Image (tube, helix red, strand yellow):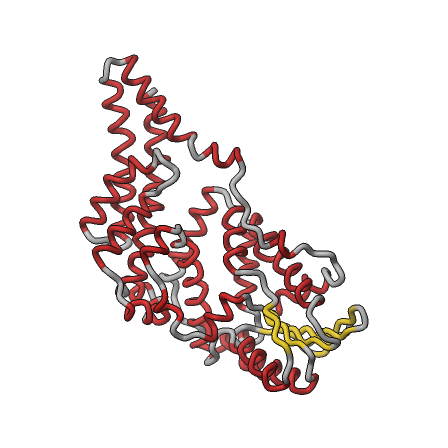
């Protein structure tokens, strides 16, 4: 193994792997990737992309295909919103640095075509990464992550010239992911370690004698440690199903509440039941309605969230956020034009509010958070009345 600037040369089973560590929003990285591929003329070029992100990078009209009702029904709101938040972060940084996010990966794709190299999309499917990461988090860390995602839109976009120069040589996206993992250790394995293993395995099994691989600089150190390792990429791509214990725990609060209702009815001749219903309904309805208002929901949606939350909190198979989002989507009817403007809308909180499509996503998250918090408050209140 040898290093030359941002290029690490690896020898593996008689083949050469030129591993280029890049910053995802750096013109210097764009130039270096293009230069190395032209000089090396590899048989294969591997890039830190999966098919979905490759399509997103090469298809400027991908958002027009979105169907808000289908996204809600398939429970993909959080996945889509997290993807948009990450895209927005890259776009904002890219605008400050004057470089399109992921430009070095696109440069690698174009240079591969130029020299006649085979292109390999070496990264794990982004849905698998996000869902495995989400599955690893406990309830409160999930709430914390959601709140931090939403708070990121309120953060100042001001950045100094010195910071701009510093960012030009950093793998900003992977550094952000590592920062998340530092504060939430449960994310370390699915968000970083598994991807390092997956990327290295994909690259070392790529065809050809000479390979150029383009990845974020933050991955290089971990990937080199997995050179030659036997990795089951199919297993790393599996979306873990909830365990029996986890599925059972979802019914703990409903079981406690329904049991408390029964106790209140039988032991106190209905008077206790009335107090418990009040204690359950009030925080559920207020929580869901309040955060729906914060998310910018229409009055009918707010009312729907308030009515639905006490009911859906007793049925883990459906959430108040889903019900509220369907109503909001029916009221706003996002158009193809709204979908086409998502790229610009996600750059600011105001843009998210003004765009009908992204407003529905915000309402879904707001109602979900409000209902969840209300359910915990309501459950504690009901138990106290026992």
Front-lying residue, 166 or 188: 188
Please say if 139 is above or below 72: above
- Image-quadrant location for residue 191: bottom right
In the displayed structure, does residue 286 sit left or right of residue 241? left
Please say if 5 is above or below 304: below
The percent coordinates of residue 56 (x first, y second) are: 46, 70
In the displayed structure, does residue 254 sit left or right of residue 58? left
Identify which residue is drawn at 35% across, 55% down: 70
Point out the image quarter for the C terminus: top left
Identify which residue is drawn at 32% across, 44% down: 370
Farthest residue to the right: give it.
14
Please say if 245 is above or below 292: above
Front-lying residue, 59 or 223: 59
Identify which residue is drawn at 26% across, 46% down: 290
The percent coordinates of residue 317 (x first, y second) are: 38, 39
- Image-quadrant location for residue 40: bottom right
Point out the image quarter for the N terminus: bottom right
Please say if 118 is above or below 115: above
Q: How many marks?
A: 0
């Amino acid at each position: 193994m040898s290093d030359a600037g941002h290029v690490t040369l690896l020898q593996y089973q008689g083949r050469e792997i030129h591993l280029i560590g890049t910053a995802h929003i750096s013109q210097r990285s764009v130039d270096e990737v293009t230069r190395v591929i032209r000089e090396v003329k590899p048989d294969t070029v591997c890039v830190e992309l999966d098919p979905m992100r490759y399509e997103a990078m090469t298809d400027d009209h991908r958002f027009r295909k979105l169907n808000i009702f289908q996204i809600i029904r398939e429970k993909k709101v959080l996945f889509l919103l997290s993807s948009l938040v990450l895209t927005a972060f890259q776009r904002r940084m890219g605008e400050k640095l004057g470089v399109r996010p992921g430009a070095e990966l696109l440069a690698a794709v174009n240079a591969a075509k130029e020299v006649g190299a085979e292109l390999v999309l070496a990264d794990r499917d982004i849905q698998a990464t996000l869902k495995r990461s989400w599955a690893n988090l406990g309830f409160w860390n999930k709430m914390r992550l959601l709140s931090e995602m939403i708070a990121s839109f309120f953060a100042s976009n001001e950045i100094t010239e010195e910071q701009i120069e510093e960012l030009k040589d950093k793998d900003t996206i992977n550094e952000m992911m590592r920062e998340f993992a530092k504060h939430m250790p449960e994310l370390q394995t699915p968000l970083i370690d598994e991807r390092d293993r997956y990327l290295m395995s994909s690259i070392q099994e790529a065809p050809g004698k000479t390979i150029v691989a383009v990845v974020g600089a933050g991955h290089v150190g971990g990937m080199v440690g997995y050179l030659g390792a036997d990795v089951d990429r199919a297993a790393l791509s599996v979306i873990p199903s909830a365990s029996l214990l986890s599925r059972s725990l979802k019914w703990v609060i409903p079981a406690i509440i329904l049991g408390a209702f029964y106790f209140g009815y039988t032991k106190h001749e209905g008077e206790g039941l009335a107090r418990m219903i009040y204690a359950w309904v009030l925080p559920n309805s207020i929580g869901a309605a309040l955060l729906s208002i914060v998310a910018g929901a229409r009055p009918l949606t707010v009312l729907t969230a308030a009515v639905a939350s006490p009911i859906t909190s007793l049925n883990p198979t459906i959430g108040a956020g889903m019900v509220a989002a369907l109503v909001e989507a029916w009221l706003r009817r996002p158009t193809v034009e709204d979908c086409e403007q998502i790229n610009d809308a996600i750059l600011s909180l105001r843009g998210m509010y003004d765009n009908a499509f992204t407003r529905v996503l915000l309402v879904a998250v707001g109602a979900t958070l409000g209902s969840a918090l209300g359910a915990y408050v309501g459950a504690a209140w009901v138990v106290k009345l026992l």
